[in-house]
Image (cartoon, rainbow, N blue to C red):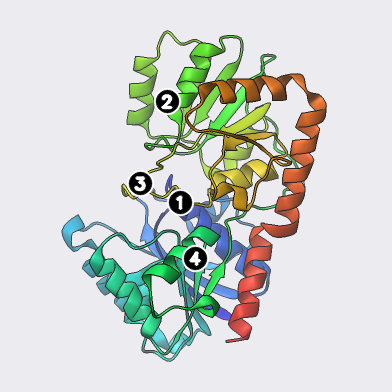
Protein backbone atom coordinates (compact mmCIF):
# COMPACT_ATOMS: atom_id res chain seq x y z
CA UNK A 1 0.00 0.00 0.00
CA UNK A 2 1.29 3.45 -0.97
CA UNK A 3 0.55 6.25 1.53
CA UNK A 4 1.20 9.94 1.06
CA UNK A 5 1.33 11.57 4.49
CA UNK A 6 0.86 15.35 4.59
CA UNK A 7 2.15 17.29 7.57
CA UNK A 8 2.79 20.91 8.50
CA UNK A 9 5.63 19.82 10.80
CA UNK A 10 9.12 21.25 10.57
CA UNK A 11 11.52 18.31 10.37
CA UNK A 12 13.68 18.09 12.35
CA UNK A 13 12.44 20.37 15.13
CA UNK A 14 11.86 20.46 18.89
CA UNK A 15 8.09 19.98 18.48
CA UNK A 16 6.24 16.82 19.50
CA UNK A 17 4.19 16.95 16.29
CA UNK A 18 7.35 16.19 14.30
CA UNK A 19 8.02 13.15 16.50
CA UNK A 20 4.44 12.00 15.97
CA UNK A 21 4.54 12.11 12.17
CA UNK A 22 8.02 10.57 11.92
CA UNK A 23 7.06 7.71 14.24
CA UNK A 24 3.82 7.13 12.36
CA UNK A 25 5.64 6.89 9.05
CA UNK A 26 8.22 4.59 10.62
CA UNK A 27 5.48 2.29 11.89
CA UNK A 28 3.57 2.36 8.60
CA UNK A 29 6.79 1.32 6.85
CA UNK A 30 7.45 -1.39 9.39
CA UNK A 31 3.97 -2.78 8.69
CA UNK A 32 4.70 -3.06 4.97
CA UNK A 33 3.41 0.24 3.59
CA UNK A 34 5.32 2.43 1.13
CA UNK A 35 5.27 5.91 2.67
CA UNK A 36 6.16 9.39 1.48
CA UNK A 37 6.08 12.13 4.13
CA UNK A 38 5.54 15.74 3.04
CA UNK A 39 6.59 18.43 5.52
CA UNK A 40 8.66 21.56 6.09
CA UNK A 41 12.43 21.62 5.96
CA UNK A 42 14.31 22.73 9.05
CA UNK A 43 17.09 25.31 8.96
CA UNK A 44 19.36 22.50 10.14
CA UNK A 45 21.22 21.04 7.20
CA UNK A 46 20.77 17.34 7.89
CA UNK A 47 20.79 14.52 5.38
CA UNK A 48 17.80 12.21 4.93
CA UNK A 49 19.52 9.44 6.90
CA UNK A 50 20.60 11.84 9.66
CA UNK A 51 16.99 12.96 10.10
CA UNK A 52 15.82 9.35 10.38
CA UNK A 53 18.55 8.72 12.95
CA UNK A 54 17.62 11.79 15.02
CA UNK A 55 14.08 10.44 15.42
CA UNK A 56 15.30 6.90 16.09
CA UNK A 57 13.55 5.68 12.95
CA UNK A 58 14.22 2.02 12.13
CA UNK A 59 12.60 1.81 8.67
CA UNK A 60 13.43 3.85 5.60
CA UNK A 61 10.72 5.99 4.04
CA UNK A 62 10.74 8.88 1.58
CA UNK A 63 10.87 12.49 2.78
CA UNK A 64 9.70 15.44 0.71
CA UNK A 65 10.64 18.49 2.77
CA UNK A 66 9.88 21.96 1.47
CA UNK A 67 11.99 25.02 2.18
CA UNK A 68 10.14 27.45 4.42
CA UNK A 69 11.91 30.73 3.71
CA UNK A 70 8.78 32.82 3.19
CA UNK A 71 6.86 35.50 5.01
CA UNK A 72 4.52 34.13 7.63
CA UNK A 73 1.51 36.09 6.31
CA UNK A 74 1.55 34.15 3.05
CA UNK A 75 3.14 31.00 4.45
CA UNK A 76 0.28 28.60 3.77
CA UNK A 77 -0.22 29.80 0.19
CA UNK A 78 3.47 29.56 -0.60
CA UNK A 79 3.73 26.18 1.09
CA UNK A 80 0.91 24.85 -1.09
CA UNK A 81 2.50 26.34 -4.20
CA UNK A 82 5.77 24.60 -3.39
CA UNK A 83 3.89 21.39 -2.61
CA UNK A 84 2.10 21.47 -5.96
CA UNK A 85 5.44 21.83 -7.77
CA UNK A 86 7.01 18.77 -6.18
CA UNK A 87 3.88 16.65 -5.96
CA UNK A 88 3.74 14.05 -8.70
CA UNK A 89 0.16 12.95 -9.27
CA UNK A 90 1.42 10.14 -11.51
CA UNK A 91 2.64 8.35 -8.39
CA UNK A 92 -0.97 7.33 -7.72
CA UNK A 93 -0.87 6.61 -3.98
CA UNK A 94 -3.57 4.41 -2.51
CA UNK A 95 -4.21 6.72 0.46
CA UNK A 96 -3.91 10.40 1.34
CA UNK A 97 -3.33 10.78 5.08
CA UNK A 98 -2.41 13.80 7.11
CA UNK A 99 -2.67 16.42 9.80
CA UNK A 100 -2.43 19.34 7.36
CA UNK A 101 -5.94 20.40 6.36
CA UNK A 102 -4.74 22.71 3.55
CA UNK A 103 -2.85 19.96 1.75
CA UNK A 104 -5.74 17.53 1.98
CA UNK A 105 -8.21 20.11 0.68
CA UNK A 106 -6.28 20.69 -2.53
CA UNK A 107 -6.17 16.92 -3.05
CA UNK A 108 -9.77 16.11 -2.20
CA UNK A 109 -10.95 15.78 -5.81
CA UNK A 110 -8.26 13.40 -7.05
CA UNK A 111 -10.34 10.27 -6.46
CA UNK A 112 -8.08 8.92 -3.70
CA UNK A 113 -9.40 8.07 -0.18
CA UNK A 114 -8.66 10.79 2.38
CA UNK A 115 -8.00 10.26 6.09
CA UNK A 116 -7.59 13.35 8.28
CA UNK A 117 -6.03 13.35 11.76
CA UNK A 118 -6.89 16.14 14.23
CA UNK A 119 -5.46 16.79 17.69
CA UNK A 120 -7.83 19.60 18.68
CA UNK A 121 -11.00 21.29 17.46
CA UNK A 122 -10.58 24.07 14.88
CA UNK A 123 -10.15 27.37 16.70
CA UNK A 124 -11.10 29.84 13.95
CA UNK A 125 -14.25 29.99 11.85
CA UNK A 126 -12.34 29.64 8.59
CA UNK A 127 -10.58 26.54 9.89
CA UNK A 128 -13.93 25.08 10.94
CA UNK A 129 -15.30 25.70 7.43
CA UNK A 130 -12.24 24.11 5.83
CA UNK A 131 -12.67 20.96 7.89
CA UNK A 132 -16.38 20.88 7.08
CA UNK A 133 -15.54 21.11 3.35
CA UNK A 134 -13.20 18.18 3.72
CA UNK A 135 -15.78 16.10 5.60
CA UNK A 136 -18.29 16.74 2.79
CA UNK A 137 -15.85 15.49 0.16
CA UNK A 138 -16.85 12.25 -1.54
CA UNK A 139 -13.29 10.97 -0.99
CA UNK A 140 -13.24 11.68 2.76
CA UNK A 141 -13.29 8.38 4.66
CA UNK A 142 -12.41 8.91 8.30
CA UNK A 143 -11.43 11.48 10.92
CA UNK A 144 -8.81 10.22 13.37
CA UNK A 145 -8.71 11.91 16.79
CA UNK A 146 -6.48 11.36 19.83
CA UNK A 147 -9.06 11.14 22.61
CA UNK A 148 -12.66 10.19 23.26
CA UNK A 149 -13.25 13.71 24.54
CA UNK A 150 -12.20 15.15 21.19
CA UNK A 151 -14.47 12.75 19.34
CA UNK A 152 -17.45 13.87 21.44
CA UNK A 153 -16.74 17.53 20.69
CA UNK A 154 -16.36 16.91 16.96
CA UNK A 155 -19.74 15.20 16.92
CA UNK A 156 -21.25 18.18 18.74
CA UNK A 157 -19.69 20.79 16.47
CA UNK A 158 -20.03 19.14 13.05
CA UNK A 159 -23.46 18.01 11.91
CA UNK A 160 -21.93 16.37 8.83
CA UNK A 161 -20.07 13.82 11.00
CA UNK A 162 -21.48 10.76 12.70
CA UNK A 163 -20.06 8.03 14.94
CA UNK A 164 -18.76 5.85 12.11
CA UNK A 165 -16.82 8.77 10.61
CA UNK A 166 -14.50 9.13 13.62
CA UNK A 167 -11.82 6.79 14.93
CA UNK A 168 -10.15 7.38 18.30
CA UNK A 169 -6.45 6.51 18.43
CA UNK A 170 -4.37 7.81 21.29
CA UNK A 171 -0.72 8.67 20.80
CA UNK A 172 1.91 5.98 21.31
CA UNK A 173 5.51 4.94 21.80
CA UNK A 174 7.84 2.20 20.67
CA UNK A 175 8.70 -0.82 22.80
CA UNK A 176 12.46 -0.76 23.29
CA UNK A 177 14.29 -4.06 23.33
CA UNK A 178 17.43 -2.49 24.78
CA UNK A 179 17.61 0.21 27.43
CA UNK A 180 19.82 3.23 26.85
CA UNK A 181 22.56 3.99 29.34
CA UNK A 182 21.52 6.82 31.67
CA UNK A 183 22.66 10.28 30.63
CA UNK A 184 24.20 10.71 34.08
CA UNK A 185 24.49 9.00 37.44
CA UNK A 186 23.65 10.62 40.78
CA UNK A 187 23.01 8.97 44.13
CA UNK A 188 20.25 11.44 45.03
CA UNK A 189 16.64 10.65 44.15
CA UNK A 190 15.97 12.10 40.68
CA UNK A 191 12.64 13.52 39.46
CA UNK A 192 12.43 14.25 35.74
CA UNK A 193 10.23 16.17 33.34
CA UNK A 194 10.83 15.90 29.58
CA UNK A 195 8.93 18.22 27.28
CA UNK A 196 8.11 21.77 26.29
CA UNK A 197 8.00 24.72 28.69
CA UNK A 198 4.81 26.33 27.42
CA UNK A 199 2.19 27.76 29.72
CA UNK A 200 0.28 25.07 31.57
CA UNK A 201 2.92 22.34 31.22
CA UNK A 202 3.71 22.66 34.92
CA UNK A 203 7.20 24.18 35.12
CA UNK A 204 6.11 26.52 37.91
CA UNK A 205 4.83 23.57 39.93
CA UNK A 206 8.14 21.73 39.49
CA UNK A 207 9.99 24.83 40.75
CA UNK A 208 7.70 24.98 43.77
CA UNK A 209 8.36 21.29 44.45
CA UNK A 210 12.12 21.85 44.25
CA UNK A 211 11.86 24.55 46.89
CA UNK A 212 9.74 22.29 49.12
CA UNK A 213 12.00 19.25 48.73
CA UNK A 214 15.68 20.33 48.90
CA UNK A 215 16.96 16.76 49.34
CA UNK A 216 15.55 15.64 45.97
CA UNK A 217 16.97 16.55 42.56
CA UNK A 218 14.61 17.90 39.89
CA UNK A 219 15.49 17.82 36.20
CA UNK A 220 13.76 19.62 33.32
CA UNK A 221 14.73 18.43 29.85
CA UNK A 222 13.34 20.62 27.08
CA UNK A 223 12.85 24.22 26.06
CA UNK A 224 14.80 26.52 23.79
CA UNK A 225 17.98 28.36 24.74
CA UNK A 226 16.18 31.61 25.58
CA UNK A 227 13.67 29.89 27.87
CA UNK A 228 16.38 27.92 29.64
CA UNK A 229 18.54 31.01 30.15
CA UNK A 230 15.64 32.99 31.62
CA UNK A 231 14.67 30.22 34.03
CA UNK A 232 18.25 29.55 35.10
CA UNK A 233 18.80 33.24 35.79
CA UNK A 234 15.65 33.46 37.92
CA UNK A 235 16.52 30.28 39.82
CA UNK A 236 20.29 30.59 40.18
CA UNK A 237 20.00 29.99 43.95
CA UNK A 238 17.89 26.84 43.58
CA UNK A 239 20.61 24.20 43.67
CA UNK A 240 18.48 21.05 43.38
CA UNK A 241 16.87 22.00 40.05
CA UNK A 242 18.63 21.67 36.70
CA UNK A 243 17.51 22.77 33.25
CA UNK A 244 19.13 20.60 30.59
CA UNK A 245 17.57 22.29 27.56
CA UNK A 246 16.46 20.57 24.39
CA UNK A 247 18.01 17.25 23.45
CA UNK A 248 17.36 15.35 20.18
CA UNK A 249 14.56 12.82 20.38
CA UNK A 250 16.94 9.87 20.02
CA UNK A 251 18.74 11.02 23.20
CA UNK A 252 15.70 11.56 25.43
CA UNK A 253 15.59 7.94 26.61
CA UNK A 254 19.04 8.40 28.15
CA UNK A 255 17.55 11.10 30.39
CA UNK A 256 14.45 9.09 31.24
CA UNK A 257 16.73 6.25 32.35
CA UNK A 258 18.62 8.64 34.66
CA UNK A 259 15.41 9.38 36.60
CA UNK A 260 13.81 7.57 39.52
CA UNK A 261 10.38 8.98 38.72
CA UNK A 262 8.94 10.92 35.78
CA UNK A 263 6.33 13.65 36.21
CA UNK A 264 3.95 15.50 33.91
CA UNK A 265 2.24 18.21 36.00
CA UNK A 266 -0.26 19.51 33.46
CA UNK A 267 -2.24 22.44 34.80
CA UNK A 268 -5.97 23.05 34.40
CA UNK A 269 -5.26 24.95 31.20
CA UNK A 270 -2.53 23.69 28.84
CA UNK A 271 -1.36 25.76 25.89
CA UNK A 272 0.12 24.52 22.62
CA UNK A 273 2.92 26.31 20.77
CA UNK A 274 0.29 28.13 18.71
CA UNK A 275 -1.49 29.35 21.84
CA UNK A 276 -4.42 26.93 21.62
CA UNK A 277 -5.88 25.58 24.87
CA UNK A 278 -5.68 21.78 24.55
CA UNK A 279 -6.17 20.33 28.04
CA UNK A 280 -9.59 18.86 27.24
CA UNK A 281 -8.42 16.85 24.21
CA UNK A 282 -4.72 16.11 24.57
CA UNK A 283 -3.07 12.70 24.41
CA UNK A 284 0.44 13.70 25.51
CA UNK A 285 3.14 11.88 23.64
CA UNK A 286 5.52 12.27 26.59
CA UNK A 287 3.32 10.09 28.80
CA UNK A 288 3.51 7.18 26.37
CA UNK A 289 7.29 7.61 26.23
CA UNK A 290 7.26 7.59 30.04
CA UNK A 291 5.27 4.33 29.97
CA UNK A 292 7.82 2.79 27.60
CA UNK A 293 10.75 3.81 29.81
CA UNK A 294 9.69 1.53 32.69
CA UNK A 295 9.82 4.38 35.17
CA UNK A 296 7.04 5.26 37.65
CA UNK A 297 4.80 8.11 36.51
CA UNK A 298 3.18 10.94 38.44
CA UNK A 299 0.83 13.07 36.37
CA UNK A 300 -2.26 15.27 36.57
CA UNK A 301 -5.70 13.85 37.21
CA UNK A 302 -7.21 15.16 33.98
CA UNK A 303 -10.19 13.23 32.63
CA UNK A 304 -8.54 12.95 29.20
CA UNK A 305 -5.41 11.38 30.76
CA UNK A 306 -7.50 8.78 32.57
CA UNK A 307 -8.55 7.48 29.13
CA UNK A 308 -5.22 5.60 29.04
CA UNK A 309 -3.74 5.82 32.58
CA UNK A 310 -5.40 4.86 35.85
CA UNK A 311 -4.46 4.66 39.53
CA UNK A 312 -2.95 1.21 38.95
CA UNK A 313 -0.49 2.51 36.36
CA UNK A 314 0.30 6.04 37.59
CA UNK A 315 -0.21 8.36 40.54
CA UNK A 316 -2.77 10.99 39.55
CA UNK A 317 -2.63 14.36 41.34
CA UNK A 318 -4.74 17.48 41.51
CA UNK A 319 -2.94 19.98 39.23
CA UNK A 320 -3.31 22.78 41.77
CA UNK A 321 -2.53 20.88 45.00
CA UNK A 322 1.22 21.06 45.59
CA UNK A 323 0.96 18.85 48.67
CA UNK A 324 -0.44 15.96 46.61
CA UNK A 325 2.59 16.14 44.29
CA UNK A 326 5.03 16.28 47.20
CA UNK A 327 3.35 13.33 48.91
CA UNK A 328 3.27 11.35 45.66
CA UNK A 329 7.01 11.80 45.12
CA UNK A 330 7.76 10.71 48.68
CA UNK A 331 5.42 7.73 48.34
CA UNK A 332 7.19 6.52 45.21
CA UNK A 333 10.59 7.20 46.72
CA UNK A 334 9.90 5.13 49.82
CA UNK A 335 7.85 2.26 48.39
CA UNK A 336 9.62 -0.10 45.99
CA UNK A 337 6.61 -2.40 45.67
CA UNK A 338 4.49 0.54 44.54
CA UNK A 339 7.14 1.60 42.04
CA UNK A 340 7.29 -1.87 40.55
CA UNK A 341 3.51 -2.17 40.32
CA UNK A 342 3.11 1.19 38.57
CA UNK A 343 5.91 0.43 36.12
CA UNK A 344 4.62 -3.04 35.20
CA UNK A 345 1.01 -1.91 34.76
CA UNK A 346 1.90 1.15 32.67
CA UNK A 347 4.27 -0.81 30.44
CA UNK A 348 1.71 -3.56 29.85
CA UNK A 349 -0.93 -0.98 28.95
CA UNK A 350 1.43 0.49 26.40
CA UNK A 351 2.52 -2.85 24.97
CA UNK A 352 -1.04 -4.11 24.55
CA UNK A 353 -2.74 -0.95 23.33
CA UNK A 354 -0.61 2.07 22.54
CA UNK A 355 2.42 1.24 20.43
CA UNK A 356 2.98 3.06 17.15
CA UNK A 357 2.91 -0.34 15.46
CA UNK A 358 -0.51 -1.12 16.91
CA UNK A 359 -1.80 2.32 15.94
CA UNK A 360 -0.78 1.92 12.30
CA UNK A 361 -2.06 -1.67 12.13
CA UNK A 362 -5.52 -0.36 13.01
CA UNK A 363 -5.22 2.36 10.39
CA UNK A 364 -4.03 -0.01 7.67
CA UNK A 365 -7.04 -2.16 8.38
CA UNK A 366 -9.26 0.92 7.97
CA UNK A 367 -7.50 1.78 4.70
CA UNK A 368 -8.09 -1.72 3.34
CA UNK A 369 -11.77 -1.56 4.26
CA UNK A 370 -12.28 1.75 2.45
What is the CA distance from the residue labelled 3 to the residue labelled 4?
A: 22 Å
Of callouts 3 and 2, which one flags the residue occurring earlier in the amino acid sequence?
2
- The residue indicated by pointer 3 is 273
As helix, strand or loop, the secondary structure at mark 1 comes to: loop
Q: Residue at x 63, y 68 (%)?
A: 360
What is the CA distance from the residue labelled 2 to the residue labelled 1?
A: 20 Å
Of callouts 3 and 4, which one flags the residue occurring earlier in the amino acid sequence?
4
- The residue indicated by pointer 2 is 204
Front position among marks 2 and 1:
1
Q: Is residue 41 above or below residue 279?
A: below
192 and 125: which is toward the camera: 125
Instruction: Name the quarter where the C terminus is drawn.
Output: bottom right
Front position among marks 4 and 2:
4
What is the CA distance from the residue labelled 3 to the residue labelled 2?
A: 17 Å
Question: Residue lying farthest front?
Answer: 156
Q: Residue at x 30, y 69 (%)?
A: 128
Residue 365 percent coordinates (x, y): 65, 78
Front position among marks 3 and 4:
4
Q: Residue at x 63, y 39 (%)?
A: 253
Residue 310 percent coordinates (x, y): 67, 44
Residue 284 percent coordinates (x, y): 53, 48
Q: Which mark is residue 151?
A: 4
Instruction: Name the quarter where the N terminus is drawn.
Output: bottom right
How many other residues sit within 10 Å of disc 2, few (<14), some (14-19) or many (≥20)? some
- The residue indicated by pointer 1 is 280
Proximity of marks 4 and 2: CB atoms separated by less than 8 Å = no
Of callouts 1 and 3, which one flags the residue occurring earlier in the amino acid sequence?
3
Amino acid sequence: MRIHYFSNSIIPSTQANSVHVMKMCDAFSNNGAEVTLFGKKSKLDLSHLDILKEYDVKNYFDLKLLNQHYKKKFGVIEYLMRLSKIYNSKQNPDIFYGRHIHSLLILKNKGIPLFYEAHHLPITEIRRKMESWLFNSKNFKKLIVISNSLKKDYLLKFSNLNEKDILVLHDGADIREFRSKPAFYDSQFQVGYIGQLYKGKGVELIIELANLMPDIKFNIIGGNKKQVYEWEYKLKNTHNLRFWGHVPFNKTEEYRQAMDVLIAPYQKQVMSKGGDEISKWMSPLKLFEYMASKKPIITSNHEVITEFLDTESAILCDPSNINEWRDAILLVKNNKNLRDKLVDNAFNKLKNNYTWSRRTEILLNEFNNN
